Image (cartoon, helix red, strand yellow):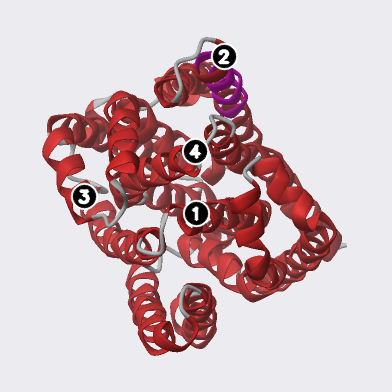
Amino acid sequence: MKTRSLNRQILNLAIPSMLAGITIPLVGMADTAIAGHLGSATAIGGIAIGSTLFDLLYWNFGFLRIGTAGITAQAFGKGDRQEIIRTGMQGMILALAFSLLLILIQWPFAHLVILLSPSSPEVEALSLEYFFIRIWAAPAVLALFVFRGWFIAVQNTLASMIIDVVINVTNIGLSILFALNMGMGIKGIALGTVVAQYTGLLCGVVLLFVLYRKMIRGVPLVAAIKTGGWKRYFNLSGNLFIRSICMLLIYTGFTFLAAQYGDTLLAVATIMMKLLLLFSYFVDGFAYAGEALTGKFIGAGDKPSLMRSVKLLFLWSTLVGVISTVFYVIGDEWLLRLMTSSPDVIRAARPFLPWLYSMPLISCLTFMWDGIYIGATAGKAIRNVMIISVIAFYAFYLALENPIGIQSLWAAYAAHLVARSAAQTIMARKHVFNLI
């Protein structure tokens, strides 16, 4: 009965996140596909580099979602309503402050990164055009990080799903309208994203006041300004910030290294990574369930439920990995043609398809561990794991680049996932299971 109840809790948390997850990579895929149908690999490269600029910015602030989720979930397990609200307020204050900073530094940041990019002048020009429009969504993007983390932590992934679906459906629809129907090109893709993010923020505010207005009224705004909770939030956030830097070194490094092989292979790498992320957002549904349940059970001091939930979460994530592999094998070149109409890009992508088939099974373990560690607020362990994985990524790339060329990028990506999984498994007893 306990196992059945836990499975029900896992699925109740995971399924809304998975449904939302379907729409998240579809936006990136839609942006890439729209650019692909503008007529050249250069347009795809412009979206790839422009999106990488935002990865460099926004991934650094992933701690707003992760820190809010971990601390709030443990407060939820304890039944501490004041800490639940206070953590959300503190996250929102930080989100608004950092978004102002991003808007202020937009010009020097974008030009510095483009200067370091090995992409062609045509790709650089398109990526800057995209960036300087989309940057105005920063306040909404960072605030939504906090909303998502908070809703997941209070075991309400349905609210988080509604926000994501609203954003992503709006984004796809407006990007097609502006970019293709109105002939705005890449500017239209960026404008569609900006409008969609503010639409999602409005949706989040409405859901918060409709579902939790009584809870909010019970905690004054001054509670967020007081010293209580800030030290823990900043300690956790500091380690998560280092984690984000490490993630950027891998993912943006992947894109920039691919760019040195020319626009066509950059387009291939971009399309392959977008297709791979389709899987990751499915397994992230169970990772979010892991965040919520791990935090709740640690906060409640319930170790037996924690151990059972972890075992069940790994079973579910492995199942997602197997199904995803089958999907990629069956989809094969059809998935490539969905992303681009360029024969050159499709032809160049064929040698890389085996990586697409194998990555779900390689990565499902580490994605699941990420959610569990976040729920445990194990900031130092999360930081150390990512430092190890960065070393693995670049060591494998440098060792294999001469003999196998761009294939070394995919071997390095796989190596960093294996390194993460191994390190997380070794550290789990100390940093997760011994907290109760």
User: Residue at (46%, 48%) from the top-left corner?
Assistant: 69
Q: Residues within 10 Å of mark 4 (few under 14, many from 20)?
A: many
Which badge, 3 or 2, comes first in the chain's sequence? 3
- Amino acid type at circle 1 is Thr
Which residue is denoted by mark 1 in the rendering? Answer: 264
| Dot label at residue 148 | 4
**Between marks 4 and 3 in the image, the one whose residue lies nearer the viewer:** 3
Q: Which quarter of the figure is the N terminus placed in?
A: bottom right
Q: Position of residue 90 (x, y in %)?
A: 28, 38
Which badge, 4 or 3, comes first in the chain's sequence? 3
Which badge, 4 or 1, comes first in the chain's sequence? 4
| Dot label at residue 113 | 3
Which residue is denoted by mark 2 in the rendering? Answer: 177
Residue 287 relative to residue 209: left or right = right
Q: Position of residue 210 (x, y in %)?
A: 56, 16
Q: Position of residue 350 (x, y in %)?
A: 68, 64
Label 3 element class: helix
User: Rounded to the nearest whole Å, what is the CA distance between mark 2 and mark 4?
Assistant: 27 Å
User: Rounded to the nearest whole Å, what is the CA distance between mark 2 and mark 1?
Assistant: 26 Å
**Between marks 2 and 1 in the image, the one whose residue lies nearer the viewer:** 1
- Amino acid type at circle 3 is Val
Observer able to see residue 89: no
Q: Nearer the viewer, residue 106 or 34?
A: 34
* Rendered image quadrant of residue 394: bottom left
Looking at the image, residue 205 lies above or below residue 21? above
Label 2 element class: helix
Q: Magenta stretch containing residue 177, yes or no?
A: yes
Magenta part of the chain: 168-178
User: Residue at (18%, 38%) from the top-left corner?
Assistant: 226
User: Rounded to the nearest whole Å, what is the CA distance between mark 4 and mark 3?
Assistant: 29 Å
